[in-house]
Image (tube, grey):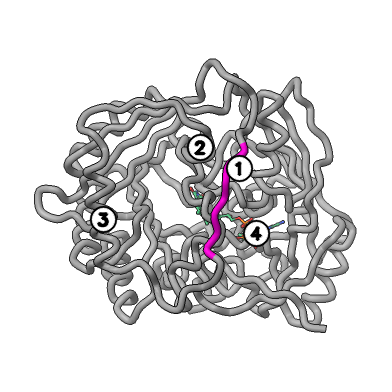
Amino acid sequence: MSLPTRLSWGRYPATPQAAHAAAWRDDVPALLQSLGKRYASTLPFGNGRSYGDSCYAESNHVIAMDGLNRFIEADWASGRIKAEAGVLLADVLSIAVPNGWFVPVTPGTKYVTLGGAIANDVHGKNHHVRGTFGRHVLSFGLSRSDKAAELVCSPTQNKALFAASIGGLGLTGIITWVEFQLMPIVSPAIDVTSYKFGSLAEFFTLSAELDPVHEYGVAWVDCLATGEAAGRGIYMVGDHARIGELEIKPSSKRSVPFVLPISAINNVTLRAFNSAYYAKQKAGKQQSRTDFEPFFYPLDGILHWNRIYGRRGFQQFQCVIPDHSAEPATRALLAAIARSGTGSFLAVLKRCGNIASPGLMSFPMAGTSLALDFPNNARLDRLLRELDVIVNEAGGRLYPAKDAHMRGEDFRSAYPQWHEVEALRDPLLCSQFWKRVTQS
Ligand SMILES: Cc1cc2nc3c(=O)[nH]c(=O)nc-3n(C[C@H](O)[C@H](O)[C@H](O)COP(=O)(O)OP(=O)(O)OC[C@H]3O[C@@H](n4cnc5c(N)ncnc54)[C@H](O)[C@@H]3O)c2cc1C
């Protein structure tokens, strides 16, 4: 019988992963042993919202964790919740919001599992206030092939594995359950204020002024604008509304039904979209109250939106540049992207704060992050190399969760802690990403 297969979100590399399902937490140790022994290595697979090859096993045989989707305990007085590792943030929100709680950190999609959120130590629009997801984790269960019993990892128990697994890319063991702290809210609605800005310098001024006084802050940037308009965009800040109902409004979902033969994103569609989107925003400041879903998850409204990039898939480029070099390096990155004429509708600039993660190999650092998607085509490699040089010279780094191209030497110098993670890696777990960046 052939197994179902999984791909990463970018559908590149297009290496289908045979998915061996874990239905119960007790299945995990036996699956890890049997797959590890049969294929030499395996890897836990969450919901495949990583873009590149960090969620691919070196062997192409993964343990599908989405069957571990049960809640274990919730204390609505303290906001502590314990659930299996395959539970999605979407599921957590559906039970937490009516009880007056919200996830303290959320990425730009709610379709990520708790295990995946820890393994990439995900960050969101409030990184400057709350740091990464790992900061809110109280404990988790970890199954390793070299330990007879499951380990409980927390800031006080199995501390080294706790730190190495947060941002540990699924290599240090399989997380079976997670206990974490939610954030209290009065309403899930978000009071949003948007500011149109005409240049990159204005982006930096706005973020310095606005981030300290708002929970959430992020900017859309027109990645094709040049000359005086380079770096223009829209800055959005938000806070949970202080009045309202604790309910989740049903949202309609559309779907891209099949993979398009070629990418629908090209210079013409992108330029037209960017100009129209920028022109639509009125000058000055605009205020509105919005449901939390369109604010946090604008792309989740279109299921399978990754199919619009066609059969060749796409790559996301996300870097973070430290504060001291952020402005000139971001300017250089945007100039190189605009010259290339390629990019995505959703190019995002975000100032990250200086709140340290408990994880060893977390991506964010105090600085500015730029993220955007590129359709795969023959010219992309050259552009990515050009961008990598700018990032390296500025002392920045790329995000493994989004990566399919980083050079090994760049990874190893940007993440010197990789040695510590390697020392604690489960001998039967290895990803294609890890092999690529540690052995080339
Ligand atoms: C539209 C979109 C927006 C995004 N926005 C953001 C953002 O704002 N910020 C951000 O940080 N990220 C963002 N991401 C990336 C995404 O949050 C991460 O890649 C996340 O880790 C994906 O989780 P997943 O459950 O899909 O895991 P997968 O993608 O399936 O796996 C990710 C990693 O987790 C490991 N893993 C999965 N389950 C377990 C487990 N049980 N035990 C141990 N390891 C495990 C895997 O081995 C792999 O290394 C975004 C992705 C998309 C598609």
Which residue is found at the position 26% from the left and 32% from the top? 206
What is the CA distance from the residue labelled 2 to the residue labelled 1? 8 Å
Q: Check disc 1: other Cα within 10 Å, few if <14, some if 14-19, many if 20+.
A: many
What is the CA distance from the residue labelled 3 to the residue labelled 4? 29 Å
Which badge, 3 or 2, comes first in the chain's sequence?
A: 2
Horizontal side of residue 425 vs 398, given as left or right: right
Tell whether label 1 touches label 2 (CB within 8 Å): yes
Measured from the top left, where is residue 344 in percent x and y?
34, 60
What is the CA distance from the residue labelled 4 to the residue labelled 2? 23 Å
Horizontal side of residue 261 vs 115, given as left or right: left
Secondary structure beneath label 4: loop
Q: Which residues are magenta?
A: 250-256
Tell whether label 2 touches label 4 (CB within 8 Å): no
Tell whether label 2 touches label 3 (CB within 8 Å): no
Which mark is in front, 4 or 2? 4
Measured from the top left, where is residue 171 in percent x and y?
66, 63
Which mark is in front, 3 or 1? 3
Residue that label 3 marks: 223
Horizontal side of residue 300 vs 343, given as left or right: right
Residue that label 4 marks: 47
Q: Check disc 3: other Cα within 10 Å, few if <14, some if 14-19, many if 20+.
A: many
Q: Classify mark 4 as within 8 Å of ligand 1 or not, answering yes or no.
A: yes
Q: Is residue 37 above or below residue 180?
A: below
The amino acid type of the residue labelled 3 equals Cys
Q: Check disc 4: other Cα within 10 Å, few if <14, some if 14-19, many if 20+.
A: many
The amino acid type of the residue labelled 2 equals Gly
The amino acid type of the residue labelled 4 equals Asn
Q: Magenta region, mostly helix, strand or loop?
A: loop
Which badge, 4 or 1, comes first in the chain's sequence?
A: 4
Residue that label 2 marks: 131
